[in-house]
Image (cartoon, coloured by chain):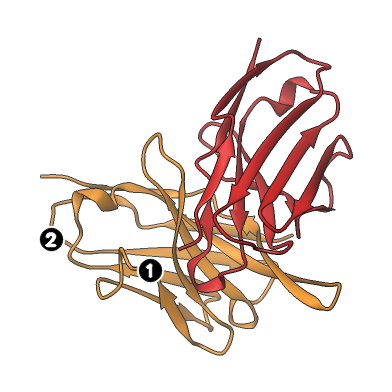
Amino acid sequence: EVQLVESGGGLVQPGGSLRLSCAASGFTVSSNYMSWVRQAPGKGLEWVSVIYSGGSTYYADSVKGRFTISRDNSKNTLYLQMNSLRAEDTAVYYCARDRYYYGSGSYYPSFDYWGQGTLVTVSS
Amino acid sequence: DIQMTQSPSSLSASVGDRVTITCRASQSISSYLNWYQQKPGKAPKLLIYAASSLQSGVPSRFSGSGSGTDFTLTISSLQPEDFATYYCQQSYSTLGVTFGQGTKLEIK
């Protein structure tokens, strides 16, 4: 059974740092594209970052230069290192698996499995 | 970024009703459109991918249609467990996937 379990959230002051973890089971993180998606309180969903199976990483403009996505293949775990945190980074952070469905000659990405989320609160 | 606009933002309906939610993209995204259901305090759940393909395990009362810029999610006969918030998501721009603002489906 596929499962994603996030941890590491909490209260942090503006300018501080936090590292989120996402432990996976039932599949291999390094063989998949993996993303972080966040949701501010009472708001919609915002994609944050992706790491490809080959190791390439990409970020939303809102976090570029401050956040770093990585993985530990031996632990089958995804990470999000968050530095220089701002109040607007306050959100529930979800890790999600990117699944690529092949049909009609194209690959169609979607997020097929999600963790339960971990809350990050940036406040003084 | 590709902007996704859902309508309505909220909707009241009764058990057994047929409900349609619309999603419009700011540019053509072919069939790169997914739908998710989210219940309070829970993670989103994939319902529909590639605009019209039903994710495994999702009841057949859910269906999706559309291509280009206009898409719909239809629930053919609302069940009590369907009251939730629904999000569309474009995956055409894989390095900048974006979601609609959500449609909250409430019990009338």
Label the red chain with its letter.
Answer: B
Q: Is residue A106 left or right of residue A60?
A: right
**SS at circle 1:** strand
Q: Position of residue A68 (x, y in %)?
A: 34, 75
- Distance in Å between CA atoms under marks 2 and 1: 16 Å
Q: Quadrant of the N terminus of chain A?
A: bottom right
**Chain containing mark 2:** A
- Quarter of the picture containing the C terminus of chain A is top left
Which residue is drawn at the image coordinates 68% and 48% (left, top)? B35
Q: State which chain disc 1 sits on.
A: A
Is disc 1 on the same chain as disc 2?
yes
Q: Position of residue B14 (x, y in %)?
A: 74, 13
Q: Earlier in the sequence, mark 2 or mark 1?
A: 2
- On the image, the x and y values in percent for residue A96 come to 57, 61
Question: Residue visible at 69% across and 72% down?
Answer: A27
State whether residue A88 is above or below residue A51. Answer: above
Q: Which residue is mark 1?
A: A80
In the rendered image, the residue lying farthest to the bottom is: A54
Amino acid type for the residue under numbered disc 1:
Leu
- Please tell me which residue is depicted at 56% across the width and 71% down the height of the picture: B94
Inspect this view and state whether residue A70 appears. no
Location of residue B104 by image quarter: top right
Q: Is residue B41 left or right of residue A103?
A: left
Give the farthest residue toward the top.
Answer: B108
| Mark 2 element type | loop
Quarter of the figure with residue B72: top right
Q: Circle 1: is it few (<14), some (14-19), or many (20+) Cα within 10 Å?
A: many
In-front residue for pair B3/A107: B3
The residue tagged 2 is A15
Q: Amino acid at mark 2?
A: Gly
Residue B106's place in the image compared with A69, above or below, is above
